[in-house]
Amino acid sequence: MYDEILLPTDGSAGITEAIDQACLLADLADARIHALFVVDEGIAGAGEWDMVVEREEGRGEAAVETVEAAASEHDVAVEKHLRRGRPYEEILAAADAYDADLIVMGTHGRTGIGRFLTAGSVAERVVRYSECPVLTARTYEDDGA
């Protein structure tokens, strides 16, 4: 059913549920996980780019290593990827490039003004434009709420 599962991660503590779901599905289907971190090109202002990208790439490496560690507990193969660009566009491009059968990603579940202030949801855009199925897992803040 699934051979290649794309798991975008932002490195936050709340992404654990999405990682768990991807690992369980990959274990059941004998699939490979593609752990993806996207360095958002829109986060740095002029003159700050190199410093911000370096910091974000470090965060990204740690994030995909967290996925790899969780997957190893399930004996699931992982490929780690870092990309630069607009997150939802890079997630969709990665799904195509890695022949993903499924995208598993976290969503903060914001509604109302919170969603408006974040200019829409990356997960919402991925769900809307993806050509393959997308499973979203609600992420929680560090306090477990």
Image: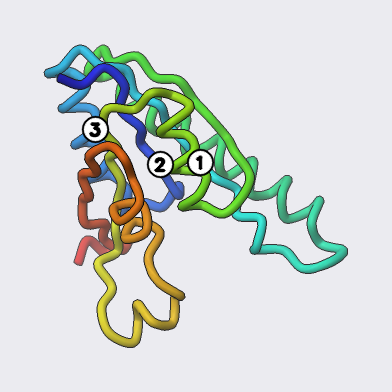
Pointer 3 residue: 22
- On screen, residue 29 above or below 55: above
Q: Residue at x 33, y 87 (%)?
A: 113
Point out the tag, 3 or 2, that comes first from the N-terminus.
2
Outermost residue toward the bottom in this view: 113
Point out the tag, 2 or 1, that comes first from the N-terminus.
2
Location of the C terminus by quadrant is bottom left
Q: Residue at x 21, y 56 (%)?
A: 138
Q: Residues within 10 Å of mark 1 (few under 14, many from 20)?
A: many
Q: Position of residue 33 (x, y in %)?
A: 34, 24
Q: CA distance from mark 3 to mark 2?
A: 10 Å
Q: Amino acid at mark 3?
A: Ala
Location of the N terminus by quadrant is top left
Pointer 1 residue: 37
Most foreground residue, 144 or 74: 74
Most foreground residue, 34 or 69: 34
Q: CA distance from mark 1 to mark 3?
A: 15 Å
- On screen, residue 15 above or below 111: above
Mark identifier at residue 8: 2
